[in-house]
Image: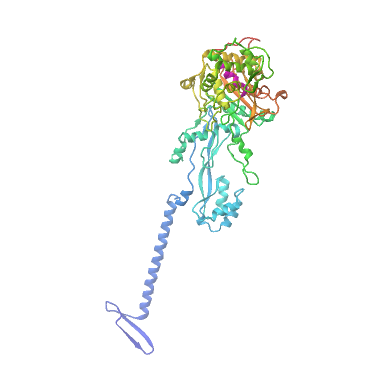
Amino acid sequence: MISFVIRLKSRAHFIVRRDDGAFIGTNAGRRKQARQRLAILIAGFFALYLALGARLVQYGLAEPVVSASIAGGAHAVASRPNIVDRNGKLLATDLNMVSLYAEPRRIVDADEVVEKLAQVVPNLDWSETHRRLRSGTGFQWLRRQLTPKQQADILALGLPGLGFRPEKRRFYPGGVTASHIVGHVNVDNQGLAGMERYLDQQGLADLRAAGLTNDTRLEPVRLSIDLRVQNIVREIVAAAMTDYQAEAAGAVILDVETGEVLAMASVPDYDPNQPSRTLPDGSVDKEYEKGWFNRISNATFEMGSTFKSFTLAMGLDAGSINLNSVVDASRPIRMGGFTIRDFRGKNRPLTIPEVFQYSSNIGTAAVADMVGIDGHQQFLTRLGLLSKMETEMPGVALPTQPRTWKKINSVTISFGHGVATTPLQTAAASAALMNGGHLIPPTFLPRTKEEAQSIATRVLKEKTSADMRFLYNWNGQNGSGRRAQVEGFHVGGKTGTADKVIDGRYAKTINFNSFLGAFPMDKPRYIVLSIIDAPRTGENGGRTAASTAAPIVKAIIQRAAPLLGVNPRFGAPGEDLLLVDY
């Protein structure tokens, strides 16, 4: 405490007495106080730097923390299981990628960031990127699924406010080969089409939402298709579309005993690695996206004369006819203002094999009339041709039929006009004609014969199936099926040439053609169905199914039969085949 002050001459001197009674001179006291203050200041700075250093060490050792704004704007992309064919060949897998994001609140100079990123990231949208950087939000995606080189180049720029998140990118090694079967995913690895979408519908999406698939290695999903056969089918239908100048084409191979789809292709198609394309003007390429349309299972068509298979099977099963029956096809049928004629008709009574061989509309209509309207509708329903097909493939189309069946409807439906079905369910129904009378839902997953029998439904008598095998074989040797015949593999089947429906009316000069084949006919193992939409030409200049759809099946069987385990069998000329009962 201060005791007193003495002024001497013109200079002030302070004598300070401490509490303990000692006196301190002015200069010495000041020096000691300065040293004390300096020591306190140094100690304070030391403590401050020590705290900052400790905090930095803590941040360096801690796990990265995603802010609430980032967590709200992005999510971890989950893993998906590999997809493989029946032999384990890879169809789809995940690749590890990174994606670039920005935290706009931390961006110092948006113009600089855009300018530098444009040097590294190809086709960067300057205006959109600038808008995102100036949004003031906590998180914005800038570019998804970058290559490692692009990531390294961006890191070298040293731009604050940018970061990377690990992601998955789906890769399809086969490209277009099985695009409509496998499908594709979006940028967040969510299934949008085909079996990819099916997997999400079976619970993969729920597992992803629960965060249970992010770092989990999932067992591969095995499909029923054979990649080797699939590649053959896709190549052949693509070539046919080009060679016959058609709008579209497709084919499917079905195991008659298990219902397994061994191959299915529809063209135009697309590359699932690039589901969409952008035109130079920045707009979406709509023409390319037409390839998403799967005509085998996601579209319905009037299948033309292939339906005569089901009409004759109906008459045989009902006992209205047998293979020795004769129907009058000598004159056209006039009904309700319509006239039913035969294409290149024989104008005489025909046996049932001749009705099938010459594809007689008149003879087939007569058989439908014998069974009756109700019986006709019930039979097609039993074969699954009038209801939505049950299978794993998403987006299956619903068949169309008249609201009320009248006699004219039954007549035209008997030869494939008036009812539209998917080609896949047409193939499944024809498998029942070949396998002893059992309707087996088609599947894209492996299935044993025992599993197939447990879910099969008997829709025909065994005798009816044996008769239909005879008719298919007969037409393969003597009728329009000869265009699909492959020496040693005994192909049978039925052509279908239908006037295409355009805007609700039949176009007389535009066809939708199909061929429904089976082989080997002594004991059929596979159904092969081909379609070709609006061909302008065909073999020998023809536009009918015999000149377009049948050659497709022939080419497929020539190349694929050995891979399917069917060995050629050559007998003496004219030797009859034993059509084995199932």
Q: Is residue 514 magenta?
A: no
In this rendered view, identify the residue nearer to me: 253 or 216: 253
Residue 38, percent from left and from top? 39, 71
Q: Describe residue 101's horizontal placement relative to residue 9 as left or right.
A: right
Q: Identify the residue shown where x is 58% and y is 37%.
A: 272
In the displayed structure, 317 sits above or below 109; it is above
Q: Is residue 309 magenta?
A: yes
Q: Describe residue 46's horizontal placement relative to residue 421 as left or right.
A: left
Residue 480, percent from left and from top? 66, 18
Quadrant including the N terminus:
bottom left
Secondary structure of the magenta portion, mostly? Answer: helix
State the image quarter where residue 225 is shown: top right
In this rendered view, identify the residue nearer to me: 16 or 500: 500
Residue 182, percent from left and from top? 55, 33
In the displayed structure, 201 sits above or below 457; it is below
The reply to whether residue 581 is visible in this rendering is no
- Residue pushed farthest left? 20
In the displayed structure, 401 sits above or below 436; it is below
The residue range painted magenta reads: 303-313
